[in-house]
Image (cartoon, rainbow, N blue to C red):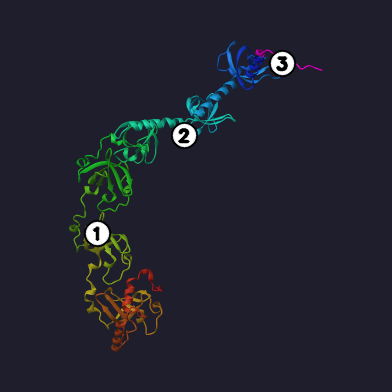
Amino acid sequence: MSKTLAPPSNPELMAMIENSLHSHRENSIVNGKIIEIRNQMVIVDIGAKSEGVVPVSEFEDEEFAVGDSVEVLLERLENDEGMVVLSKEKAAHKQNWDKIVAVYEDGGLVKGKVKSVVKGGLMVNVGVEAFLPGSQIDIIPPKDLNEYVGNIYEFKIVKVNDIRKNIVLSRREVIEAERAEQRAEFLSQVGIGNQVEGIVKNITDFGAFIDLQGMDGLLHITDMSWGRINHPSEMLMIGQKIDVVILDVDKDKERVSLGLKQLQDNPWEAIEAKYPINSEVAGKITKLVPYGAFVELEKGVEGLIHVSELSWTKRITRPSDVLSLDQEIKAQVLAINTDEQKISLGVRQLEPNPWDDVEQRYPIGKVIKGEIRNLTAYGAFVELEDGIDGMIHVSDLSWTRKINHPSETLKKGEEVEAVVIDIDKTNQRISLGCKQLENDPWANIDDVFKVGDLVKGTVAKIASFGAFIQLEDDIDGLVHISQLSEEHVAKVKDILKVGDEVEARVIKVDRNERRIGLSIKAAEYSEEQLRKETAAFEALRPSSDLVGLEQAFNLAEEWSPSEASSDGDSEEE
C-alpha cells in the first residue's frame, strides 16, 4: 500500500510560494530589473523561475541601462523556449488606460499630442491612441487638418469602449466651456457705450459677427458706416481686428449689439446748415437704380436724385440712360429729412423751366407748325421744341368726319399745322387742334341741309348697320340699312360698296349731335310719303327690332377701321 506525500510543514516557505504565485500572474503588471541588453531584446528579471524578454523597440525614445528597474506586463509565464514573455509598452498602455477611464468617469480633461490625420478626423496620443472627430476639433470647422498635427491640446473624453479599447475625444467641448466662462466674465464687466476690441469672425449679407473674448457680438450693416454700403465685405474681412462700441447688451440671451460708425462724428448732425435748401452741391454718383441716382456729397452723406428730377422736358425712364457710375455731378438740394437721413436732390432745377413762360411762346390761338413725333389711339404728338410736345386729340382733327385713329389723316414724321387751343402748365400739356384752322361747317348746317333735300354723295364707309355717305363740305351722312331699299336688306354690302355715287333724301338733321340721316329709298318719295317716313323715324326707339337712326349713330361711335375694309367688301357681322 503506497503513502501519500504530506505538504511541507514550514509555514514561511508556504507563504513565499503563495506570494510568488500571486505576484507572477499573467496579464498583471510586475516590477523587474534589467540584467542584460542584447541587439533585439532586453533581459529582465522579475523573480520568476526564469528571466523575461522585452523587445528593445519598446524602450524607444528613452534611456535605459543594466540594473535599471522597469515596470512590465507579464504576458506569459513561459513560452516555447521556457522564457517569461514581458511587455513594457503594454504595461504602460494598461496603466494609461486605467488613468483614462478614471478621468472619463470624473469628467476631467486630458492632454494629448496630435499624431496624424485619418479619415473623418485626427489620431491623438493621450497615453493611448484616441480618435478626435473632425466635427469636434474646433468651433469653426477647420479647412486643413494637417495644421493640427504635432500640436498638444487639452481634450474632453466623450466616449470609452473598454471592450474594443476605443476612445473618442472632443476639443470643441473644451473650447465651448472656456468660451462660456469668458462670456460670463465679459457680460459681467461690459456696459453700453464701452469700446472693445474684437476680431471679425463671420460676414453675412446683413452684418458681421465679431469675436469679443469668447463672446460673439453682431455688428449690423446699418451700424458700420454713416454712409450707404451695399455689403459688409466692402468694409470688413474675416480675421480683421477692429474697435467697436457696445450699443446693447442682453445678458439673458447672451446677445451683444455693436457699432462701428458710432466711433466717428455723425455727419448728419449739422446737415441742414451744411446743405441749405435750394443750395447747389457737387458729388459723385455711387449707385444707379430704376428710380434714381445716389450721389455722395461727403463721406457718410448721400443724396438721391429721383428720375423725375433729371429733366424739365425729357421723359427719362432709366437714370442709366443719361448718367454713369463715378460721374461727378452738380445738383440742387430740394429737401432734407434728418430723422431718416435722406437728402433729395434735383438736376433740372439748375436750368430754367421752359414751362414757366410757355404761354408767352405758345399763346392760345397761335398757329404752329411741327413734326408729328408719335401717333396713339387717341391722338398725335407734335414736337414744338426740344422736349416740349403738343397733342392733337383725334376729336380735333376734323369738324365733320368721324376719325377713329389719327393715322387715317396723319403720318409720323410729316409736318402738320395746328392751332394752340389749351395749356395745362401743372400737368405740362399743350392741346392743339387742326379743325380749328377752318370754320365749323356745322355752324350754319341748317342753311346747307334741310329735311327733304335731295343730295348726292359718295359711299365713304360701310358698317353692319348702314353706310356713311360723304356729302359736300366733307360732311358725312348715314344711310341706315332700313333706308337702303323698300325690300329687306340682309347685308349693306349687297347693295353698296365704298366709292359708289348715291342720291338720297335728307330725313334728319341734328345740329347739336352733328348728325345727318339719309334715305336712299326715299329719293323718289313724294312729299306725303317723305312726311310719313320722317314721322316713322321719330317713333323708332333703340329697343325696336329694327335699329333706328339714333341707335345707328350710337353704333357709329364705336365703329373702327378694322370693321370695314377700304374697298367696302368687309362688313361687321
Amino acid at pointer 2: Pro
Q: Amino acid at mark 3?
A: Pro
Element assignment for label 2 = loop
Q: Which is nearer the eye, 67 or 536?
A: 67
Query: Quick one: which residue is furthest to the right in this view?
Result: 1
Q: Residue visible at 21% across and 74% down?
A: 443
Q: Position of residue 511 (x, y in %)?
A: 24, 76
Position in image of residue 551 (x %, y %): 32, 76
Report the Cα–Cα distance between label 1 and label 3. Answer: 135 Å
Question: Callout 3: helix, strand or loop?
Answer: loop
In this rendering, the answer to whether 58 lies above or below 273 is above
- Whether 61 is drawn above or below 467: the answer is above
**Mark 1 vs mark 2, CA separation in Å:** 66 Å
Residue at image point 35% right, 41% down = 230
Magenta stretch containing residue 495, yes or no? no
Q: Looking at this view, is 296 or 140 the one in front?
A: 140
What residue is pinned by disc 1?
Answer: 429
Which mark is in front, 2 or 3?
3
The answer to whether residue 115 of the structure is visible from this angle is no
Relative side of 418 to 546, left or right = left
**Picture disc at residue 141:** 2
Q: Secondary structure at mark 1?
A: strand
Which-is-in-front pick, marks 1 and 2? 2
Q: Which residues are magenta?
A: 1-13
Percent across and percent down for residue 76 are 66, 21
Q: Splitting the image into 4 quarters, where does residue 338 fall?
A: top left
Q: Which residue is mark 3?
A: 7
As drawn, the label of residue 368 is none
